[in-house]
């Protein structure tokens, strides 16, 4: 029984390391997309995807450290990413983020 538990812990550790490396490579490619993106919507999608990758990386770190405290940080990253996506979409669509109608 202890051998199976040790094997499963080792397998989880390897999966977390592999996933973290894959997310790191993805983040580097997304940074390239943000800086060299041909259009503003491409840059907006890159920023949104970076937020999703950061949420996944936070979840992996929480699993690796066996702590539930990082889950709040992942939710906060998700909320801020959503608000950033809304602001970017409004800017791409209208050219301004805050409308000030001074009638």
Image (cartoon, helix red, strand yellow):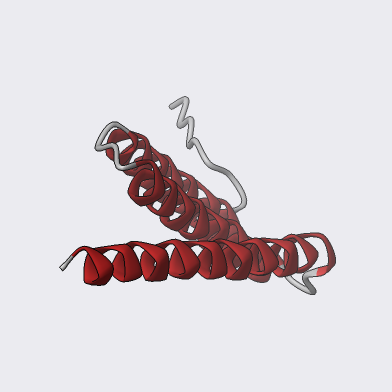
Residue 85 placement, left or right of 40: left
Position above or below: 16 against 69: below
Residue 97 placement, left or right of 28: left
Which of the two residues, 46 or 70, is positioned nearer the viewer here? 70
| Residue under the point 42% across and 40% down | 80
Most extreme residue toward the top is: 102
| Residue under the point 74% across and 71% down | 39
Most extreme residue toward the front is: 2
Which of the two residues, 31 or 9, is positioned nearer the viewer here? 9
Position above or below: 29 against 24: below
| Residue under the point 47% across and 25% down | 102
Which of the two residues, 95 or 57, is positioned nearer the viewer here? 57
| Residue under the point 48% across and 30% down | 100
x and y percent of residue 33 in the render?
Answer: 74, 68
Residue 71 placement, left or right of 96: left
In the rendered view of the protein, which quadrant contains the C terminus?
A: top left
Most extreme residue toward the right is: 36
Total marks placed? 0
x and y percent of residue 19 in the render?
Answer: 51, 68
Residue 30 placement, left or right of 63: right
In the rendered view of the protein, which quadrant contains the N terminus?
A: bottom left
Which of the two residues, 81 or 15, is positioned nearer the viewer here? 15
x and y percent of residue 44 in the render?
Answer: 60, 61
Identify the image quadrant of residue 32.
bottom right
x and y percent of residue 37 in the render?
Answer: 77, 70
């Amino acid at each position: 029984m202890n051998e199976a538990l040790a094997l499963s812990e080792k397998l989880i550790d390897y999966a977390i390391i592999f996933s973290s490396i894959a997310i790191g490579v993805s983040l580097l490619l997304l940074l390239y997309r943000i800086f060299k993106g041909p259009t503003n919507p491409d840059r907006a999608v890159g920023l949104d995807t970076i937020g999703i990758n950061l949420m996944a990386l936070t979840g992996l770190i929480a699993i690796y450290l066996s702590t539930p405290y990082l889950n709040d940080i992942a939710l906060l990253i998700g909320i801020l990413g959503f608000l950033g996506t809304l602001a970017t979409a409004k800017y791409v669509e209208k050219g301004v983020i805050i409308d000030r109608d001074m009638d």
